[in-house]
Image: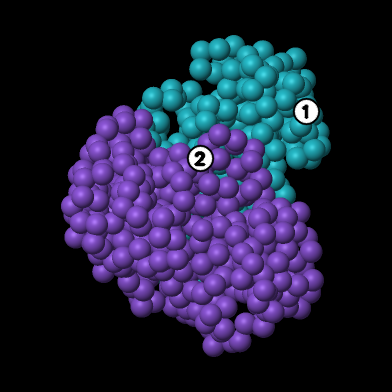
Chain colours: A purple, B cyan
Amino acid sequence: MKLLITGASGFIGRRLSQALLAKGTIGSKRIDRLVLVDQVEPDLTLAADPRVESRVGALLSQCASFTGDRFDGVFHLASAVSGECEDDFELGLRSNLDTTRALLDALRIATAAGAQPARLVFASSVAVFGPDPSAPLPALVGDTTLPAPQTSYGTHKLICESLIADYTRKGYIDGRAARLMTVTVRPGKPNGAASSFFSGIIREPLAGVEAICPVDPSTSHPLTSPARTIEGLIAVYEASREQFVGRLALNLPAVNARVSDMLDALERVAGKAVRDRVRFVPDARVAGIVANWPAGTTAERAAHLGLHADADFDCIIRQYIADCSASPEALKGMTR
Amino acid sequence: MKLLITGASGFIGRRLSQALLAKGTIGSKRIDRLVLVDQVEPDLTLAADPRVESRVGALLSQCASFTGDRFDGVFHLASAVSGECEDDFELGLRSNLDTTRALLDALRIATAAGAQPARLVFASSVAVFGPDPSAPLPALVGDTTLPAPQTSYGTHKLICESLIADYTRKGYIDGRAARLMTVTVRPGKPNGAASSFFSGIIREPLAGVEAICPVDPSTSHPLTSPARTIEGLIAVYEASREQFVGRLALNLPAVNARVSDMLDALERVAGKAVRDRVRFVPDARVAGIVANWPAGTTAERAAHLGLHADADFDCIIRQYIADCSASPEALKGMTR
């Protein structure tokens, strides 16, 4: 079978590509061809796999050519992120709305030409939820909580969920949407996103660097590891249509943790000296943004697919440490 | 001030145009120019008004020119209807999504060029709601019930609500969305839409013609008159931003009536002989579609704007009879 991953060189895309190549099959079908689309070249190890075909360039300009591809399945991860969309409204519309529409229409045209409707997993986001004075967010945001995005990014994700539901209802694709939670611990540098500190307060102390936490220790948020996210995307792909009773969008599982819980876990896993590298310097702007995000989520529909969250935040930290085993620099601050 | 109405020659558009010209002002500002856009020429009486400027043609091809118009306000009513969208998917995408996007972008560009953000009322629809096995519809569907459209038309309306909320959040427009209920009694011929009988079982008997009711007399639905719908659109336009706490979309008020209530009203208003012209001939296809629609709605947010439903279905019938005073043919079946 022939699979497409959009946004394949991103944080999630690379890990998903690796996981699928290692697994070799999806939905008990052998993966013969894995087409990786991204503006950035794939890792050399991925590109070297004979099953991989890399197509580097803007997704929007490539979609028309997909009508001849007859993809059996698609993971649609490509997206301009939250901060980019707020800074450049037209970029967001083009990258997130126009591109998804072009992708869906290419698949629709392929179906009309006789292809089996492609199975498509869309990476949606917890950002579809937001505070709504006319219908306040519950303490735990569930699969069927009324969305009210407060960013263009969340708006685009919600709109794409609706489009995918309608293209699926019409039989043009076999779509489903997995709402990703905040994935930690992201490697690399702080990226200026308001959520950046959720990774930074773990990553920097482990590297021996001081980290600033801009919010109160009682701040709670739904968090997940890269591994659980990849597992979720694959399970959502492999689920039968019948397992999606009603709507096609679901929350992926998360650990609902307070910042203080995260730091307690950091101390347990890496020692008190590491934890002590986190300083609290309140930032009203960041705290205000974060106050608008869900404090926690539930994922009942994902549970029906056999998915579960990381056991606790300790597991999420241990996963990051294991991922960093090849780069000792990232862990030079560890005291145990 | 300069106002644009899209879909101005439709059932609602014509009445809204008449009402606004008669009123002469909106939001206490004098209407100097009323631009009517539709694929169909406006009524001669409308076209003769010196304030009216008619622009006949496809809305999509006209949007780019709106950047120079500096509209103070817009009523965006133009839409391909439910049946058209189901029959021609691309027509629906073009007429409802691409056109709304082009309209919003023209207004955004005008704002960027220094215009005051245009106030925009979008005619959304009760069709955004649908049955969802994962979150069943409540007996009464409210402003904050989770939408789950079961048609492309409803999907497009929901997507446009989200776009309008985001363009408003960014300050590009001052948008709001009024979800129209099923407007009765529509004049003219049955149009083949599944909802057509809600008007037909009143209109045909009044004209002395037998009507077929394809659903059970206990079938309930939210219904409204053209006059209350026009009143609602204008009130939603005139409301201040502050009156829209949280989300910008609201249900317009409706009379939640069973078919049997509608026929009881018909008998009270027009006599038993008129009612007896309605025959029940069950149609499983129509009944199946209607079973997926809300049986009733509430409109708390509209109530805060001072809006209310027709007092009862008798009022809706009397309004139709008054509207037909110039065409005795439409009422030749009346026995009192």
Q: CA distance from mark 1 to mark 2?
A: 31 Å
In the foreground, A247 or B171? B171
Q: Nearer the viewer, residue A284 or B66?
A: A284
Q: Looking at the figure, which quarter contains the N terminus of chain B?
A: top right
Amino acid type for the residue under numbered disc 1: Ser
The tag on residue A204 is: none
The residue that disc 1 covers is: B65
Q: Is residue A134 visible?
A: no
Residue B225 horizontal side relative to residue B260, left or right? right
Assign a secondary structure to mark 2.
helix
Residue that appears at 31% across and 38% down: A212
Q: Chain of mark 2?
A: A
Q: Is residue A103 left or right of residue B161?
A: right
Residue at 74% across, 21% down: B68
Q: Is residue B143 left or right of residue B107?
A: left
Image quadrant where residue A117 sits: bottom right
Q: Could you tell me residue A30's position as x and y percent?
A: 61, 86
Lateral position of residue A334 relative to residue B301, left or right: left
Q: Nearer the viewer, residue A142 or A188?
A: A188
Crowding near pointer 2: few (<14 within 10 Å), some, many (20+)?
Answer: some
Q: Nearer the viewer, residue A250 or A19?
A: A19
Q: Residue B237, position in %: x, y?
A: 51, 27
Q: Residue B267, percent across and down?
A: 45, 52
| Vertical comparison of A293 with B86: above or below | above
Instruction: Say which of marks 1 and 2 sits in front.
Output: 2
Q: Chain of mark 1?
A: B
Are dots 1 and 2 on a single chain?
A: no
Residue A100 location, quadrant: bottom right
| Residue ID at (78%, 60%) | A64
Q: Position of residue B285 (x, y in %)?
A: 57, 72
Residue A83 is labelled as: 2
The residue depicted at 40 percent of the width and 45 percent of the height is A196
